[in-house]
Amino acid sequence: MAVAAAATLCACAPAVSWKVPRVGDRPPVTAEDARERDYQQVLARYSSHQELYDRLDTRYFVAATFQSVPFREARVRRAGDFRKVPAAELERQLAEERAAAAAAHEVFLAAHFTDPRFDDLDRPRSQWRLALVTPRGEVTPTKVERLGRSTMDQRSLYPYFDEFWVGFHVTFPRAFPDGTEVIPEGTDAVTLRLASALGNAELRLAVR
């Protein structure tokens, strides 16, 4: 049944606006318009999204953000603004994020599946194959951590992470087994691929 249905699926990804249904309260924004605009621009640069439909029925919405150093810094500062984090603590958090970026490639992934049986990305025998595709090939995750349903705090950082979506923290290695870099120097973007019999999503993510 799933294979037959998959034949009718098509992936659609509007280039500019994200036509995602909104549920519940809108995500929090900062008090300063300029700071809000700057953050949204950084978020948009390192994010991508896609929808998958079966005729007129939605199969899923999926969105992701590559955790580049510029985005990590913007995210930490934004969270710090909301939480009134002291300068010393903020600098410690920034240092931790830079160290994490040097240790692994990380992606925040959020998805809404009309059928909850499909949201098994973190399971050992998941129906989905996740891969990060780069100019040198592809790697699969070393870890997929399920974050669960969105909170207002998370939505302040990832506005697309809507109320009934499920979030995942996906970790990829920085190097192949032979020691070569997964994302070579000078790479502008990579592709996060989610593939199964239900359909295929390929999200282009800027990395610098």
Image (cartoon, rainbow, N blue to C red):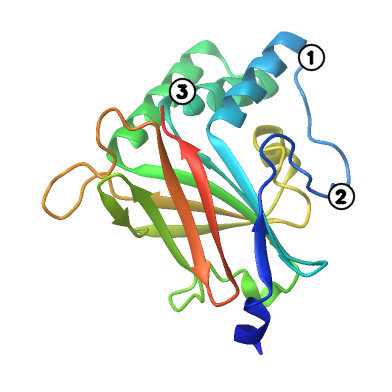
Residue pictured at 79% horizontal, 35% vertical: 27
Q: Amino acid at mark 1?
A: Ala
The disc at residue 70 is 3
Image mark for residue 31: 1
Q: Amino acid at mark 3?
A: Pro
**Nearer-the-camera pick, 178 or 10:** 10
Position of 183 with respect to 200 (left or right) is left
Q: Earlier in the sequence, mark 1 or mark 2?
A: 2
**Residue at the spot 66% in from the left edge and 48% down from the top edge:** 13
**Which secondary structure lies at badge 1?**
loop
Mark 2 Cα shell of 10 Å, populated few (<14), some (14-19), many (≥20)? few
User: Is residue 2 or residue 101 the one in the foreground?
Assistant: 2
Residues 134 and 25: in front is 134
Q: Gap in Å between the C-alphas at discs 3 and 2?
A: 29 Å
Label located before the other in sequence (3 or 2): 2
Tell me where residue 56 appears, x and y as whole percent: 83, 67
Helix, strand or loop for disc 3: helix
How many numbered circles does the render carry?
A: 3
Screen quadrant of the C terminus = top left
Give coordinates of residue 202: x percent, y percent: 52, 54
* Residue pointed to by mark 2: 23
Q: Position of residue 28 (x, y in %)?
A: 78, 30
Of callouts 3 and 1, the N-terminal one: 1
For image coordinates 39% across by 31% down, the residue present is 188
Q: Quadrant of residue 186?
A: top left
Kind of element beneath mark 2? loop
